[in-house]
Image (tube, rainbow, N blue to C red):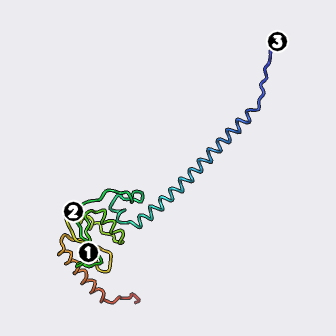
Amino acid sequence: MKRDIIEIRNNITNTVVRLEQLEKEREEREKAEREAKYEEERKKREKEEAEWKVKHRVLDKYTYISPWNYNTYSWIGDYINLRFYEWSNIYSEPKFFSHSTAFFRFLDDCGIMPAEDDVQLFKHFTGCHAVCKPGCSEIIIKRTYEEMKEEFERVSTLAKVLATVPDIDDAS
């Protein structure tokens, strides 16, 4: 009985191994490139967000507006019916704001940061009057014009008195 012996010879094994190795290297390279791209985009987003928070402190604190929805944000805010007297001039024509988001945008543009109590105050009043204290960016918000005028005059008088007091050096 004669047995036919079949001998299989091939050189395909080295080629397959090399192709698998190249595929693995390609996948690792693409993964590293993706991660680098994601990291770069994350840093860019964080930088944009930090810059936006510095520029829009009021909107960031009191609304849900972000750098990503700033141009398309459609909620107009709470109804506030606020009259703002610009340039600390209580005798000028007031600027009228009917909704909080518009007022917050205005405060951001002017660089004015309202106190938490002031925000709660004008959100709960059906109408109020506001003016900046003379020489600074702090706000006086009162329910009526007379209350606001009285507080403004009190603060103005206090500012004038303090302006006449000389500075004391602690050189001793």
Amino acid type, callout 1 = Tyr
User: Residue at the top extreme?
Assistant: 1
What residue is drawn where x is 28% and y is 83%?
159
Alpha carbon of mark 3 to alpha carbon of mark 2: how far?
Answer: 106 Å
* Circle nearer the N terminus (1, 3): 3
**Picture quadrant of residue 84:** bottom left
What residue is drawn where x is 21% and y is 68%?
128
* Circle nearer the N terminus (3, 2): 3
Dot 2 falls on a residue whose secondary structure is helix
In the shown orientation, is residue 140 left or right of residue 66? left
What residue is drawn where x is 80% and y is 16%?
4
Q: Position of residue 101 (x, y in %)?
A: 31, 62
Q: Residues within 10 Å of mark 2 (few under 14, many from 20)?
A: few
Q: Residues within 10 Å of mark 1 (few under 14, many from 20)?
A: some
**Picture quadrant of residue 106:** bottom left
As drawn, 154 above or below 115:
below
> Can residue 117 be seen in this snapshot?
no
**Picture quadrant of residue 102:** bottom left
User: Residue at the right extreme?
Assistant: 2
Residue that numbered label 2 is attached to: 124
Residue that numbered label 3 is attached to: 2
User: Residue at the front extreme?
Assistant: 93
Dot 1 falls on a residue whose secondary structure is strand
Q: Which mark is residue 85?
A: 1
